[in-house]
Image (tube, grey):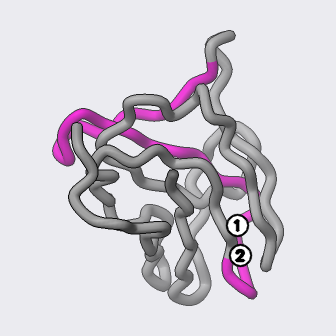
Amino acid sequence: MPRHKPVSSFDLVVASGASVSNIVDLQGYQAVRIITPAALTATYLVFLQGEDSGTMVLSYDKAGALIVPPVLASRSLELGIDNFRSCRYFQIRTCSTNTGTAGNEAAARTFKLIVD
């Protein structure tokens, strides 16, 4: 799919009291990195992706393990280029455990999704 315009990042916003972000259309770009906000309630993230915005599924690596990295505030997290190749729609869920259990944020949080 051709790139529509030069974009280097998308905002992923998790509302206060929620655990899932908005869904972004990557428009032919590839997700490569997430920059976390200055404050976080969650300690882990899981990633959801889909071919359409109505059917988002959890992301697993090639070995079949849920992709659920630990996160800290004000950090840049590399996503691993092979994990999100050909991903059209992208979303995050904040988690309280490394099993992917949803963890609501105490305030609205904006994550930056860096694309290539």
**Residue at screen point 51% across, 32% down:** 59
From the image, tell me which residue sits under label 1. Answer: 42
Who is closer to the viewer here, 12 or 86? Answer: 86
On whether residue 82 falls in the magenta region, the answer is no
**Residue at screen point 56% across, 72% down:** 112
On whether residue 52 falls in the magenta region, the answer is yes
From the image, tell me which residue sits under label 2. Answer: 41
Who is closer to the viewer here, 62 or 65? Answer: 62
Residue 39 locus on image (x, y percent): 73, 85
Say whether residue 53 is left or right of residue 42. left
Q: Secondary structure at mark 1?
A: loop
Q: Is residue 85 above or below residue 53?
A: above
Q: Are marks 1 and 2 in contact (CB under 8 Å)?
A: yes
Which secondary structure dominates the residues rendered in magenta? loop
Q: Which residues are magenta?
A: 37-61
Q: Is residue 86 above or below residue 70?
A: above
* Type of amino acid under label 2: Thr
Q: Estimate the spatial distance between the alpha carbons at disc 1 and disc 2, rounded to whole Å.
A: 4 Å
Q: Is residue 97 above or below residue 61?
A: below
